[in-house]
Image (cartoon, rainbow, N blue to C red):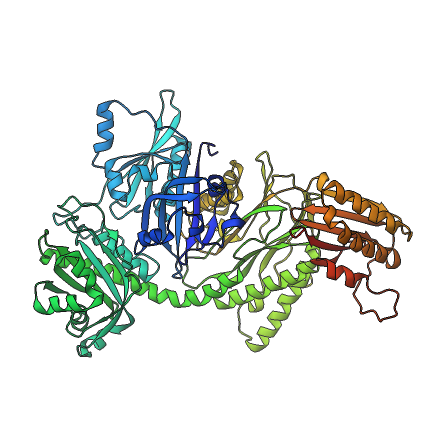
Amino acid sequence: MERQSTYTATATIDEQGVLTGWSEGARRLLGYDSPAVVGRPATALLAADGAAVRRALAGRTRWNGTVPLRHQDGSLLELGVLAHRRTSRTGATDWLVVSAVTARTQPPRGEPLEEWTFLQSPFPLAIFDADLRLVRANRRMEHALALPEAAIRGLRLTHIAPGAASEEAVRSMRRALERGRPQEARGRLGPDLGQAVVLTPLKDADGQVRAVCLSVPEPARETAGGARPSGGSAAPVGTAADQARAAQELGEVTVPRLADLMAVDLLDSPWTTAEAAARPPEQVVLRRAALRAVPAGGGPGHGGGAGTGVGAGAGEVIACPADSPPTRCLTAARPMLYDMADPAVAEWVALDPGASWLRTSGTRSLLAVPLLAQGSTLGVALFGRHGGRGPFGPEDLRLAEEFTAKAATGMEQARGCSRPRTTTAAPQRGLLPHTVPDQAALEIATRYLPAAARAGVGGDWFDVIPLSGARVALVVGDVVGHGIRASATMGRLRTAVRTLADVDLPADELLTHLDDLVLRLAADEGSADPGADTAGGIGTTCLYAVYDPVSRRCSVARAGHPPPAVVAPDGTVRFLDVPAGPPLGLGGLPFEVMETNLPEGSLLVLYTDGLLQARDHDIDEALDKMFIALGRPAQSPESVCDRVLGDLLSHRPDDDIALLVARTRALHEDLVASWELSDEPTVVSLARRYTTGQLSAWGLDEAAFTTELMVSELVTNAIRYGRPPIRLRLIRQGRTLISEVYDASDTAPHMRRARIFDEGGRGLLLVAQLADRWGTRHDRIGKTVWAEQSLTAL
């Protein structure tokens, strides 16, 4: 369990500067609830000029520093933050911003000799406490991460160096803490760190594990020139999922080790080797993918540190003249070494805006290397050195070719997989809900992880659907297969579920209608393509659950889908014993509903089977890990999602994963009022008095007139056209007031247009005009007509 004195505040910001994510820690820190800030410009929270922050982030992939922020109460906070620029496999980019909020005092320092040993060790060392938050980092680790200890103290490793390697290391940390024995993890946490880390539990005098030490026993070696030699320890340049990230990685590994500054410029349409050889020297149009440098005199040998992003050059379109170094390098398809004093080069640097970065940086030696991969020329990498450093030599040329070839391979792989994945990922992203709808019954967190396979994203989906009477429907489904077909089928089924949910069908009836839809889709597609596999989504699984915060009852039905897990408030974990039901599309087989009570504060966990099908463990082990992860106390559903995925996944999943975690809330008796009514016409006036009295008790006198009118019409209709018993219920849910009238008749009311001299027929029309929403839901016996009105404007 996290200690109350320490927590992590996180936020995500898209490239337009709009907040897209807001954690519980961020709410605790600044006082804003997620709906109040998500979707708004991040600069709205700044107590300073937003343009200065944008300039600081321009061209960078990571930034740390102090930011002045405005608390909800108006007070000013000077907050140290760490920001990572992330690029997804589909090319979308955003910023992950994290800050550790801690009142924890620094651990006491050891004896002088022990302290010197820790700080001056040639190996990177970091100490994480029992909550896996960093408390110490030695100088070698600070240098390797290019971050001071003060900027990362209190953060977890996954926030310090996001990525699969840190996630694997965190899992090993947990094992070291639990088992009390050293553990190993594979993966590079940074370009200056080796391929493996050792996690050693640190015990007190009583043998109790109090912390864990992360060490890198084989740090990356460097040559005299500052660059890493070839071989197995070479940096993983080009391993990123897109060209932009691969270009940025090339800069991270070569500046300042090989060069003081570098740029990667890409062709919009790569040339084949034959095209490059036959192309006469002419102007070439390039697009800047990365720009990285250290200040003059700041490279190796000058006391400099790691390279930093410079300028806002990324994305800039550059037209290179025929005799410029980039054009010559591309047409010759080989590296070229230049002295900046060369008149032709000096003229190019002086006149071409695309080369201004070389002029302003004081570059004296320039190396141009083409990006070649699988018979294609993708662009050019330019490396420069300042005057205080010797010019490039033959060994530098060899290293530059090696690094650039690795980067080009990664870029070519990104080009090969981005087109089909983008084609399928775009509709997938559009069909999945981007935000959870406003509702008070459940606190919800969701995650969607696409598979690592190149077949493209699949048909896993989830949804949250507000229903009448303050209830909420939760849906998780899994369409067979991957690619456009699976995404299209998923979209059809998700739309059908929403449509069927709007008419308030019970869970088993909804799945029956969905089963019929899949059969029709299969018949339509089968007639067009008799050989089609899984036509129309046959074999699709789905789980549909409805939670009622008034009764605290949850009804669940499933069609071949894994059963949901429930975590009781006392931490007990169990699967709900929901009858399995057949997958959709088999037809003719029934679905059954299981109902259960969920105490307030219970967790309901819905997921697709990809979560339990990791390649490095069987399903029984996966279930054990999930039970352990769910059984540990958590502050919020968001942290539960992170913990489950962190404990069960050691790498990108082989199948898509959808995960939905909901914590139940309850509408207590003071927010619900109900009355049994007779079927006598005189009871209408009594229903109005009940309504007025209850609204007065709730302090909602201003809503009394409108609510009285609606209740009067609904009760009158129930008496005239329904059957007893008749019940009136009022529900106050946040800023919404719900009026419901139940009767035992199955006949559904409908609006009609009354003629001028008609004495009736205007009741439901009046309700429709006064309410924000109204409708009918059918129970096993009888029906309920309901109307909702917003209290915001009152």
Side of 206 relative to 347 (left or right): right
For residue 586, which quarter of the picture?
bottom right
Residue at 28% in and 43% down: 145
Depth check, front residue: 129 or 669: 669
Q: Is residue 9 above or below residue 513?
A: above
For residue 313, which quarter of the picture?
bottom left
Q: Is residue 225 visible?
A: yes
Depth check, front residue: 699 or 249: 699
Residue at 37% in and 54% down: 86
Q: Is residue 118 above or below residue 417?
A: above
For residue 512, which quarter of the picture?
bottom right
Side of 45 relative to 725 (left or right): left
Depth check, front residue: 484 or 670: 670
Side of 442 relative to 339 (left or right): right
Expressed as whole percent of the image width and height from the top left, the position of residue 497 reads 63, 61
Depth check, front residue: 384 or 745: 384
Expressed as whole percent of the image width and height from the top left, the position of residue 81 reads 37, 43
Residue at 79% in and 43% down: 693
- Direction top: furthest residue: 206
Q: Is residue 372 visible?
A: no
Expressed as whole percent of the image width and height from the top left, the position of residue 204 reads 36, 23
Residue at 64% in and 39% down: 600
Image mark count: 0
Expressed as whole percent of the image width and height from the top left, the position of residue 624 reads 50, 41
